[in-house]
Amino acid sequence: MIQAVTQSSFNAYISTEDTRIDTSVSSDKIRYLMKFTNDMDKSVQYAYSTIHLVYDRYTKMTFTYNATPDVYTGATKLIPAGYYKYEAYEVSWSGAVAISAGNAPITEDDVLPVGPTHGVVQGLVAIGKLYMADKAGTAQVQYTQRQEPEGTNYIYYGQ
C-alpha cells in the first residue's frame, strides 16, 4: 500500500522487476504509466513519475502535487483524500526514452505509431491501493474540542 498526504509529493515503491514483461530491453528503457482510480467517485488520473529509480527488487517512483495534473511530468492532483486503486502499466522504448506528447502513451489503450522514440504499453505489472490522507488542517470535517463542563454535560455547536 502506498501512503501519501494530499497536496504533497509522494514516493511509491513497487515491485516491478519480478513481473517485467519486456525483457529484451534494459531497465533504463522502461517506464511505468500509473493509473489512479478514486474508490468513491471512480475518477481516473494517469501519470508517469518524475523520478524513476530501478533497484533489484523494486522501483522507486516520485509523484508531485500540482493544481493542474500532467501525465508527462508526474504532476498529480489526487483530491479528495481517501483510497485510490493504482495500476502500473509497463511502457518500453527501443530507442531513447521520451516522455512527452506524441512519444509516450497517455492511457493503457493508447497506441502510437511504430518508432524508436515511441513508447509501447506492454501490459499491467502491478495493482494495489493508495491511501491519501488529509493534509493537516484541510480535512472536510473539523472538530473543535471544548473543555468539559463541571456540571451537566451540554453539546455545543455552531461557533
Image (cartoon, rainbow, N blue to C red):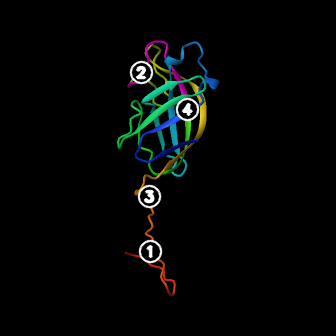
The amino acid pointed to by label 1 is Arg
Residue beneath disc 2: 103
- Check disc 1: other Cα within 10 Å, few if <14, some if 14-19, many if 20+: few
Disc number lying in front (1 or 3):
1
Instruction: Return the residue at label 1.
Output: 146
Residue placed farthest to the front in the image? 150
Residue carrying label 4 = 88
Q: Which label's residue is closer to the chain start, 1 or 3?
A: 3
The amino acid at mark 2 is Asn
| Residue 91 highlighted magenta (yes or no) | yes
- Image position of 8 with respect to 156: above or below: above
Q: Which sits earlier in the primary sequence, circle 2 or circle 3?
A: 2
Q: Nearer the viewer, mark 4 or mark 2?
A: 4
Q: Which residues are magenta?
A: 88-100
Q: Position of residue 96 (x, y in %)?
A: 43, 14
Q: What distance separates the C-alpha of mark 2 from that of mark 3? A: 39 Å
Task: Specify the quadrant of the image occupied by residue 147.
Answer: bottom left
Instruction: Locate the N terminus and report the quarter of the image it occupies.
Output: top right
Q: Is 141 drawn above or below residue 63 in the view shown?
A: below
The mark nearer the N terminus, 1 or 4, is 4
| SS at mark 2 in the image | loop
